[in-house]
Amino acid sequence: MTAIIEVDNLTKSYGSKRGIAGVSFQVQEGEVFGFLGPNGAGKTTTIRTLMALIRADSGTATIAGLDCWKQSLEIKRLVGYMPGEPALDPNLTGGQILEYFAHLRGGVDQAYLKQLIERFELDTSRKFRQYSTGNKRKVVLIQAFMHRPRLLILDEPTSGLDPLNQQEFDHMVIEARDEGRTVFLSSHVLSEVEKTCTRVGIIRDGSLVRIGDVAEVKAIKRYEITITFANPVPAETFKSLAGVADVETLDHGHAVRLAMQGSADAVIKAAAHYSVVSLTSYEPSLEDIFLRYYEDDVAPAKEVQSVAK
Amino acid sequence: MWLSSVFLKTLRDYRIAILGWGIGMGLVVVSPMASVAALVTTPQARQQLVSIAATFAWNADPVAVDTIGGYATFKIGIFMFLICVWPLLAGSRMLRGEEDRGSLDVLLSLPRPRLNVALEKLAAMWTALLVMGLLIGLLAFAGGKKFGGDFDLAGALFFGLNLALVCAVFGGLALLISQFTQERGPAAGWTAGLLLVFIVLDMVHRVVANGEWISRLSPIYYYNLSKPLVPSYGVNAGAMVVLLALAAIVSAAAVWLFVRRDVGGTVPLPRWLRLPERQASRALPVGDWSLRSVYTRSMGMIALPTFWWTLGIAGFAGWMVYVVQLMEARLSSLLSSSPAFTALIKNLGGSDVGINAGFLSAMFVFLPLLLMAFAVTQVSSWSADEQDGRLELVLAAPQARASVLLGRFAALATATVAIGVVTLLASAVAAAAAGLSLNGGNLAAATLGMIPLGLLIAAIGYLASGWLRTAAETGLLSFVLAGWFFLSFIGPELKLPDATLRLSAFYYYGTPLLHGLQLTSELGVLAVAALALGLGTLRFARKDIGV
């Protein structure tokens, strides 16, 4: 496989405000790459630099060997783009917007476009301003896919979509991958990128802190289980179990909150010895994970190097 | 403190409007005071002014127009539509605008009755109108003192209050109509339409005998019953109470409907008034010409505003051409007895010979000003599109940045040319209808010659948008426009050097109705416009979008 996106030491700041600093990564042609990071980490800045909407202060970014700034017109022919906060002419209908962008792109297969509209069950007769958040995103998602681009760059694409449409989106990403196309999508939800991505990069405070296969990154994923018992249960029962990172006793021993990493099998089996009133599992946000995982502010560059080796 | 209640927060949002609109409208009241003082220097001039005002009696009551207060009241009557613009915009935005933005959902999620929220917002608008009325009254009083008006402070304050009351009626009406519309734009549009209808209804009794009962249906009629700046006419307390009652009734109805309807929804209309149910569709508008390119899309966007501005500019030109013949005798007398007015016409029109052409030439200076104001609104819309992220997806399509900007500019240029051509046709038709003999070449130069000025301010706007945000850019362009007009309007009287006068774009427009096309000057303006556009395009091609 060859790299379709190559980013080397990319830096962008907004006056005195941080954007991204020294970001480097590659995305191979045909893969689905997840770009993860908490809000304000620098995901959108990276994507907007790739789309030549902003110009990097230093470093290089190429798509299909073309310079993202100097050869942006050629690049845009290859790319389908979905911005994080789609803003379109509020007085145009969804149908007019799609038709307009089809003309601006040229060569859009109308039959395929209609197929996408059907697939997302989009009512094209409503004005953009009248759409719900989810329907607005559907319009923008369809315009990103409608010309069957070689590369899809999608900034938080599923935000605002209902579960059924999220599922439809996942299918479309998998179809694109199966057709040999590349997908670069950003998200701040780890479980979301797990479903479709083969590799992920994690950005925090403008710097890439980790890049690798999804399985590698999963290792940092933590979640919490809270079990409420009919009678008090000693915390020691769970402390030494596999997958348990931390135990906290609640409600005078009637409940325990377990910080988990890995399989919950041992915990479930241990809890089954007691009378369980309820069991809830909670996946913390990426910010929470980062706060824990990087709480001592380990130098990010060092970590990237270690994964890259 | 300003964020401690809905009332104070809303009032805080109005602070710039209060100052801007209050002082602006106050100056609109004061400026005719300055001109009437210069106009009525002799008994003949006084008589002619009364006579000319009588020509416009269909529009506003010409009561004691040879006095400072009477003339200001008369002029404000003509500009009633302008005065009511802010309240109708504020009324339509007050609740519906917040619903459009989604901010009302958050506000109504607070443990605070919906009625209180609406009443506090309404109270803020009324307070804002009262403060504006106070500012207008104080400025009118200061103007009266400066130019020798015979009204007192109470009269000036009642004048401001009368204006605030009629504004409150239209603000309340816009608020009421917005309960029936899904968006704020149509509410403002419907209210503006009603305002025009009411202005026309008010005119009826001045031109139709026994038509007073029709005029009584209009709030403007009750506004005109009070003339506090004319001490002999005074305040009609009953009429002011009617205005207050009308404002209270429409506002109360609006609030009553608001607390009963869905937030984000509308008050259901009777079945016979409802539009047909829209069927959901998956169709695409394949044959829509306006979606074929950035240029055609821009034409689609600019079409409606162009229509209205054309109506205004061409209508103004046609009307002036039509009435100038009718006013010739009175103007001649006024010019001969008023050196100040003669100087004014000379500065604007370029000559004091040939009354018709000289006066028309002075009036035609307003045409490029209006056309440039149109261009400023369109440049602001381009700048707002970038600022609000609406260009992002267009620029993510394989379209060169330069072609996106130039496509948009080309649409504006097309609209500018169309306005110029329609204005030429309207003026020619009006001249033929009035039997006025005008040099065809000069008329073409006067109407088509304003096109380069429109293009110039547009190009400067596109260049400025490379650095400035919408509000700053619009402010800068308005300032430039006002500065240029001031240089050409007042500059010669102030004996400013020719080099300074040349800084104004109007200098290069000249007086084409009298002296024909100044080809070199117009080409120079076009060259500067092309340079500004070129630099603006270069800047846009290199800048960070939406930052």
Image (tube, coloured by chain):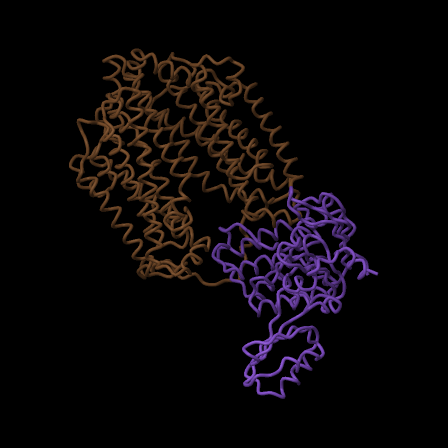
Chain colours: A purple, B brown
Residue B424 placement: quadrant? top left
Which is more toward the observer, B223 or B285?
B223
* Residue B410 visible in the displayed image: no
Question: What is the quadrant of the C terminus of chain B in the image?
Answer: top right
Viewer can see residue B264: yes
Position of residue A7 measured from the top left corner of the image (x, y, whole percent): 76, 52
Give percent across and percent down for residue B157.
26, 33
| Left or right, A222 with reference to B432 | right
Residue at 60%, 30% (x, y): give it.
B532
The number of discs equals 0
Pick the residue in front: B362 or A64.
A64
- In percent of the image, x 74 and y 44: which residue is there? A58
Question: Looking at this rendering, what residue extends furthest in the right direction?
Answer: A309
Q: Nearer the viewer, residue A273 or B357?
A: A273
Q: Please state the horizontal and vertical placement of residue B217, each as a whole percent of the image.
A: 22, 43
- Please tell me whether residue A197 is drawn above or below residue B358 in the rendered image: below
Residue B200 at what x, y percent from top left? Answer: 27, 38
User: Along the line of sight, which residue is nearer the eye, A296 or B325?
Assistant: A296
Q: Which residue corresponds to the image point at 35% horizontal and 14% vertical from the top-left?
A: B342
Residue A201 image-quadrant placement = bottom right
Is residue B296 shown above or below A203?
A: above
